[in-house]
Image: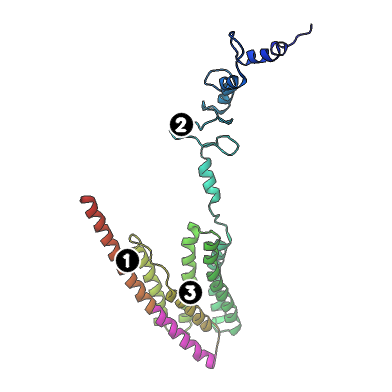
Amino acid sequence: MTGVPASAAGGPSGARRAAGAGPGGPVPGRAAARESRGPGPSGAGAARRSLTGRGAVTHGDEAAPAAAPDGTEGVTAEDGTRPARGAKIAAAAVNQASVWNIANLLTMLRLLLVPAFVMLMLADGGYDPAWRSFAWAAFAIAMITDLFDGHLARTYDLVTDFGKIADPIADKAIMGAALVCLSVLGDLPWWVTGIILGRELGVTLLRFLVIRYGVIPASRGGKLKTLTQGIAVGMYVLALTGWLATLRWWVMAAAVVLTVATGLDYVKQAIVLRRQGIAEREAALEETEA
């Protein structure tokens, strides 16, 4: 007779003996399967431990998460396998918004438009209507992107640390460049430029001073101020004459009034926020001491 494996020659009982049945009789199939997954050095459990290197069963209906080296319970994936170390961190990094998203690209475009605007504004002495029109186009694009990048970042969850820093810098850079150029050319009084830029710098510093107590939210008046400033500065960038030149003076006057009023409102909010923060801290200290 040709050579036949012992398990095959013995039929079902031989297969059960090969799976671990003792001399006292056949071991049921479920018990044999449990023995093969047991802690002993033989069977499928040992084979799986040799593959994972962690001494834990990672497959099967009865598999339980193994203890990680740091003492925490392991996490099994949908297919029953345990993810590699650092998989959670890698997944979190993938879920974060990329720096190269549409909102940040618009912010970077606005930053690049600042030197382009200055060159166009001062080209040919700064009084050529054609160059001023090109400068106005660059300024208008920058203002339009300012309206969309923040909205896109919040709507589609594209908020990044880069955007939080670069967006306000780009906003103040394009507005500051336009105001300074207009004052250098003599089209806008320096005191107007000083009030607007001083207010922006002051509010920014104020936000940082009270950040430990909370965040001062942007108000509707602040948004209206930004819109009015953009319209007024845009009208000054263009070489307007006649009644349009008179109209832009009134629009700029309204922008200055809104600038001062909203600046004072931010100061009031900062004072209230600081007082509330101090009161809450004192109350917390009293509770801990009690």
N-term-proximal mark, 2 vs 3: 2
Q: Is residue 188 visible?
A: no
- Please tell me whether residue 225 is drawn above or below residue 104 in the rendered image: below
In the image, 255: left or right of 147?
left
Secondary structure under badge 1?
A: helix
Identify the residue at horizontal 56%, vertical 73% (top origin): 144
Q: Residues within 10 Å of mark 1 (few under 14, many from 20)?
A: some
Q: In front here: 107 or 10?
A: 10
- Please tell me whether residue 108 is drawn above or below residue 20 in the rendered image: below
N-term-proximal mark, 3 vs 1: 3
The residue carrying mark 3 is 175
What are the residue bounds of the magenta stretch? 241-259
- Please tell me whether residue 156 is drawn above or below residue 58 in the rendered image: below
Identify the residue at horizontal 54%, vertical 81% (top origin): 126
Give the label on residue 69, or none: 2
Q: Is residue 242 magenta?
A: yes
Secondary structure under badge 2?
A: loop
Give the label on residue 273, or none: 1
- Please tell me whether residue 243 is drawn above or below residue 181 in the rendered image: below
**Is the stretch drawn in magenta largely helix, strand or loop?**
helix
Query: Outermost residue, bottom direction?
Result: 242
Q: Which quadrant does the N terminus fall into?
A: top right
